[in-house]
Amino acid sequence: MNDNNNISKGRKAIITILRPKIDRPITYKIKTESGKYSEYEELYNMFGYFLETKETFYKDYDLIPLYTKQALTTCKRQIGEKEIQYNDDETQRLIITSESHNFIKEGYYIEDEEDEKGFAKIFSFINKILSSNKYNQVIVDVTHGFRHLPMLILVDLIIQNFQNTSKVEKILYAKTIGDEKENKYEIIDLKDYLDIANIMFVVSSFKHNFTTSNIEVSSKYSGFINSLCEVSNDLLSLNINHLTKQDGQGSANKLLKDIQKLQEELEKETQNKEHFLINPLKDLAEFVKGLINFEGKKYYQTYLELSEIFYERDYLINSIALLCESARYFIKTQLKRECSEDLTNKIESIEDNLDTYETLRFFSGLSRIAKNRDGNYIEDPRDPNSSQYLSKFAWSEERVIIRGKERRIEANEKVKNRVIKNTFQNRDSQNSDDYNVLREKCMAINGTLSKVSMLSDEIDDLRNKLVHINPNNDFDEIKKQINEKIERYKEIINEDTPTN
């Protein structure tokens, strides 16, 4: 029978580190699956507990001990001298001869070391079992393997050394109850502490730079972690629409719901006592709400705020891209504010018939202007982008002239052109007048729109350089250039900020 078949049958294992020395009996207080506590007395280590409760709780488990020579002596005293053999050869194998204890599998011998080498060997053995295909679920018992270490240091050691925690069902640890002389312990699951430590790290990382780590957590936390990763992906890919959907399906709203759900589960689990994660989760929820608090704000304001947030975290390409889109949204917003109701309705009709990007391209092309020596604003024929925009939105049927050459427009482009042409640029004089009104507003000398339009070109050029070319300037110089664009843009739009 191969290992894959074993996995399909749900093979499980308990890795236990045998206690090296017996002083006096121990009492263990252990929480059962029902949530109630049971006490087990007159035991000398968890090895004895597993033997005693095998038929009750661990029928499907193999028991794999890690032991030193001294710990083996303890083991012999517990299950009988004749029922155990110890081969003192190269493999240092532990062999059980008694049928009553045949669930104990071949163990692993550890030399009597308590330094870093000893830790490394223990983790090496554990990782060997976790990485094999033999078992699909593993309980790791460290109740007596690291008694001299504080619990937080042990958790940190586990985080650093466990190579795969997806198979780890529990990490059992003995927490002293009352006076140490009583020799009484509560067995707790460090897997929850491991999850908490991982989650605290991921939450901190997200709040600082929007990134998450690929961590393994219990099913209790998986929904929350998946939602956090989705928000991270939306932020870093600038998928703002998916991040902020207002129908409750946006990734940010889903994360907020999962945070609330997890909080309620943790409060119920701890009977309303303060859980380690409650406050970090509350802080995260407020942080996410701040990211999507766009109520009453125009798109250009939202994109500017996000641009500054990304700038503060040194995501310069994301920052300049958002600033570029903010400028385009500002041009559209300002035009709608200044135009007549009829003309504003026409602008909105474009928005209804084209996707957001094409609409912004139209307004960016509409306002693309240059200044000549006499101080008049004209279309710049030397700017290839300007030429493309002028041709793209000119009166055209199936062909356009770009740089003196006739080119066909693709079918989907013809549909987009027709929407704009029918709205503003067909041969109907009224539509032509409307188009001219928009152009004049964009080209008004010293007007807010003309200033934003010219700055928008500079922002766009800087963005293209950062995306397509490896600039010679160092990081600080690039950051300085972006900051200068942000501050200039804020200064311009604050002179005459649209309010409707």
Image (cartoon, rainbow, N blue to C red):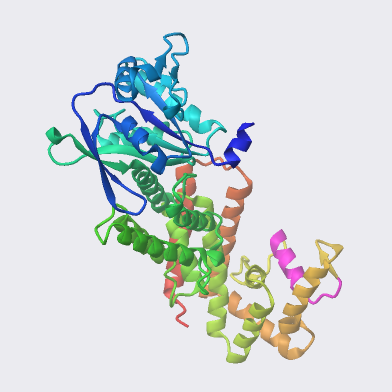
Q: Is residue 93 above or below residue 187?
A: above
**Quarter holding residue 405:** bottom right
Give left or right: position of 475 versus 45: right
Q: Residue furthest top?
A: 89
Q: Where is residue 214 drawn, in percent x and y?
A: 49, 44
Q: Where is residue 330 drawn, in percent x and y?
A: 53, 72
Q: Nearer the viewer, residue 377 or 93?
A: 93
Q: Nearer the viewer, residue 249 or 236?
A: 249
Q: Is residue 338 above or below residue 199?
A: below
Q: Where is residue 57 drawn, in percent x and y?
A: 40, 43
Give left or right: position of 127 versus 436: left
Give left or right: position of 320 versus 423: left
**Quarter holding residue 416:** bottom right
Q: Nearer the viewer, residue 320 or 3?
A: 3
Residue displayed at 60% across by 41% down: 8
Residue 391 falls within the magenta-colored stretch? yes
Magenta highlight range: 384-398
Q: Is residue 477 above or below residue 399?
A: above
**Could you tell me which quadrant the N terminus lies in?**
top right
Is residue 215 something that shows in the picture?
yes
Instruction: Name the main secondary structure of what is drawn in magenta.
Output: helix
Numbered marks: total = 0
Q: Is residue 69 above or below residue 240?
A: above
Is residue 383 something that shows in the picture?
no
Q: Where is residue 316 drawn, in percent x and y?
A: 50, 51
Residue displayed at 47% across by 53% down: 222
Residue 335 falls within the magenta-colored stretch? no
Q: Nearer the viewer, residue 37 or 381?
A: 37
